[in-house]
Amino acid sequence: LQFLYFIGKYFVASSTTHMEWCNAVSNPFQRMLTLLGMLCLFASCVSTGLITATLTALEDEFGIHPTLLAVIVVMYDSAYVLTSLPTAHWLYTDIPKSIGGGMALFGLASVFYGFGQAFPMFLAGQFIMGVGSTPLWVLSFVHIDDNVSDKHKVPKYIGRILAKTPVGVVIGLVVGGLFLTNCTDEEKCGDSNPTPTISITEIPPQEMDCSGWKYSFYIFGGISFMLGVWFFFTNKHYNDYIVETSNEDGKGKDEEKVPIGLGEALRRLLTNKQLVLLLLAQGFMAFVGSAIVAFAPRFFEKTLCQSKSASSYYTAVFIPFVVAAYAGGGKLLDVTKWGIRRQWRVIAISQAVGTPFFLGFYSHSPILFVAILCIPCFLLFFPNAIILSIAKRIVEPELRPHSMALVNVSSRLVGSIPGPIVLGVLLDANFITDRSAYVLVSLIGAGLSTICSLVGWYYAPPDEEDSKEIPKTELQEFQDVPTPESAPYGEDDTQVV
């Protein structure tokens, strides 16, 4: 119970006192953040953690070739790429219902994946999971931005949500491994002619049941479905601010906006020089991060001669630094309240400083390697919340969902899809060593990201102009909204008006 209590405190705004805990639970805005964090955690737990942990079970139980296993993994990102822009364009009108309905579909797809008996079923389950989780990753940050008056606090909340994703990956890996604890193929381990031993379970290897992994998909799929249904019925707005603009006659009038077509929205976004540079910088970051994450256990095992379990433990050391990077980037902007130009500078400096440390792949000690790589690991993921903050501020308000969709699509098209493939090809090549392959991919991706960040910093508007981005009348509306004495939740951006 004590463990669950502290886990609950972590989910709800990282409260430090019991009164803050109670305030967060009773606060509708904090409950919304809690639900979004839990949805992100379970989405990453199933789509990345459980899928990765159970791939070998699919290979052994159903005889699926490794190439087809890679196709199963890629289907999630492929579905995301195909549905991101339509989701941003047509499902923005009611974000809670879009996210909740999508995660309910995600949960059902997870259960369907667990019932799979052949390659097409696993392929379909993974694709539907990608479709269901798309509204969560595209619209959740826009939903936060819609309900926060002080826009400088948005990166802090985004970082808090993003920090749940690596935690979900670890939970998925651990839980998936636990369900496969007794599923070990003795013939593929150790020497080529192993000495006959007596199994602890006294069950012959050919009769051992490896289907326990399916229960993990049933459990987490069911939880995701219930959380999705819960979020489906949450409020659409927590701060009902009404922003009025003046017409030519000087009379206040609600602004009537003409709907923008998807083609026109894409044209505006892709002609935005800063946004294009931001997409490329984010994509090259993901290129390095996805390649390293995919092959880090292999580096420990094949290059540094560590056991499989030790390789997993060493890889898990990087996760706290990723969590700290996600949360730290958002907290930095909340404290400093920097403008867009200074935010670009933070991105460029973090990438430039972290790039040389990838030479740590030439180290021969696993402890020294972990100590060196933790630095670029932190600096690589540090600007993520900052990038999402800039992507929303450099476009028109009605294009924010499309901007979020493009940021996530670019991170997959430029990063997470080609990154592991390029590194895998280099590792199979004979003209380059494994260490040089890791270093080459890391330096190229981080170097290109640094160049794009520096160019974006150069073209960013001065902070004086950036401070005028939000109209004065809108800021006054944010500040002058009366707050009922019956609901004093503490922070102005979490009060229900």
Image (tube, helix red, strand yellow):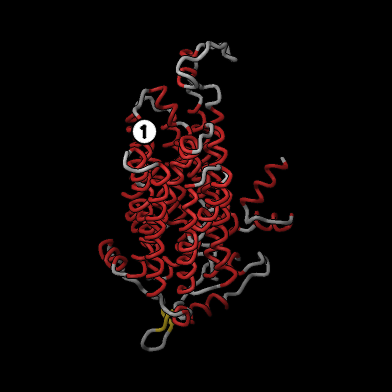
Which residue is drawn at the image coordinates 65% and 48% (left, top)? Answer: 8
Tell me the amino acid under the disc marked 1.
Leu
Which residue is at the front of the view, 177 or 135?
A: 177
| Residue 225 visible | no
| Residue 476 visible | yes
In this rendering, the answer to whether 244 lies above or below 304 is below
- Screen quadrant of the N terminus: top right
Q: Residue 137: x percent and y percent? A: 44, 53
Which residue is drawn at the image coordinates 47% and 56% (left, top)? Answer: 140
Q: Residue 356: x percent and y percent? A: 47, 58
Q: Secondary structure at mark 1?
A: helix
The residue carrying pointer 1 sits among few (fewer than 14), some (14 to 19) or many (20 or more) residues within 10 Å by Cα, namely some
Q: Residue 393: x percent and y percent? A: 43, 70
Toward which corner of the image does residue 3 lie, by quadrant?
top right
- Total labels: the figure holds 1
- Screen quadrant of the C terminus: bottom right
Which residue is drawn at the image coordinates 47% and 42% (left, top)? Answer: 296
* Residue assigned mark 1: 69
Which residue is at the front of the view, 240 or 133?
A: 133
Which residue is at the front of the view, 57 or 392?
A: 57
Which residue is drawn at the image coordinates 46% and 58% (left, top)? Answer: 355
Side of 297 where 491 appears, left or right: right
Q: Residue 202: x percent and y percent? A: 57, 11
In this rendering, the answer to whether 286 lies above or below 130 is below
